[in-house]
Image (spheres, rainbow, N blue to C red):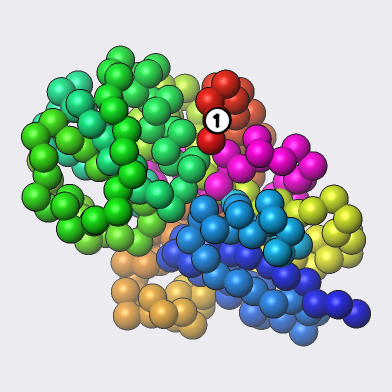
Amino acid sequence: MARLRIAAVSYLNTVTFVHGMEHEAEKLHADILLQIPSLCAESILNRRVDIALVPVAALLRDTSLKIVTPYCIGASGPVRTVSIVSPCPIEEVKTIMLDSHSRTSAALTELLCRERWGISPEFAQLTDYSSVLAPSPHTAYLLIGDKVFDYEGRLPYSYDLASEWIAHTSLPFVFAAWVARPDIDDDNIATLEKALAYGTTHIEEAVAASRYATMGSKAVDYLTRNIDFDLDIDKRRALELFLRKIAPVSW
């Protein structure tokens, strides 16, 4: 039997998923590729993997992809690791440098600029992260993933994108979901779902077995307070709304 190819995000927020897949490795029979979010999307869009945890904006690029498993990377409150940091209030920002690791976060940034903050800044790609600590005037920076921990409290203004979306819509947010190619067997999906269930119910164990073990309770706190793994009805409603709002934009 051919081995499954699965792409997952290489951030702290997915250690539970990875741990679950490793726990079920014998039954899952898969090769796991850890990548930044944007590359997870490219991997499944280019058919290099069978299943992937992808930024949800990728769903607009290939309608044949189907969401599988009732698990996601979501937030029902502050997510911490998707933030805009700035030397000035968001209303005074003229340029936003976008972290290229996730199209979804970039699309959410543009949406919030347009609908919540009423600003029309220029957008550019952020490649030199050291520039965040020497910001240009009226320039803000979208940061995602583990690197955000390094910049918390370093600039005067910070905007948590999950919190801003929730305030704007009264709905939670879904940053990434599990998707599969149409020909993937239901039994494989069921085994993956079992693996993810194990990981999300053994968070302390997952952290201890990961490269984040030295963070200890801080990592556990983040995974229990900031990340919501359940793709429930409200998150599905939020996902539909978000995709409808960004559909006219090419991401």
Q: What residue is shown at x 61% (from left), y 43% (from top)?
A: 58
Q: What residue is shown at x 21% (from left), y 37% (from top)?
A: 140
Q: In this view, does 78 lie to the left or right of 200?
A: left
User: Residue 57, located in which quarter of the rendered image?
Assistant: top right
- The amino acid sitting under disc 1 is Ser
Q: What element carries label 1?
A: loop
Is residue 59 highlighted in magenta? yes
Residue tagged 1: 250
76 and 182: which one is in front? 182
228 and 41: which one is in front? 41
Is residue 92 highlighted in magenta? no
Picture mark count: 1
User: Looking at the picture, how far across and down is residue 35, in whole percent?
Assistant: 52, 65
Q: Is residue 64 visible?
A: yes
Image quarter (top left, top right, bottom left or bottom right) of the N terminus: bottom right
User: Looking at the picture, how far across and down is residue 180, in whole percent?
Assistant: 76, 54
User: Looking at the picture, how far across and down is residue 110, in whole percent?
Assistant: 39, 28
208 and 174: which one is in front? 174
> Residue 122, relative to residue 13: is it above or below?
above
> Residue 41, relative to residue 83: is it above or below?
below
Magenta-tinted stretch: 55-79
User: Residue 166, located in which quarter of the rendered image?
Assistant: top left
User: Looking at the picture, how far across and down is residue 46, in whole percent?
Assistant: 69, 56
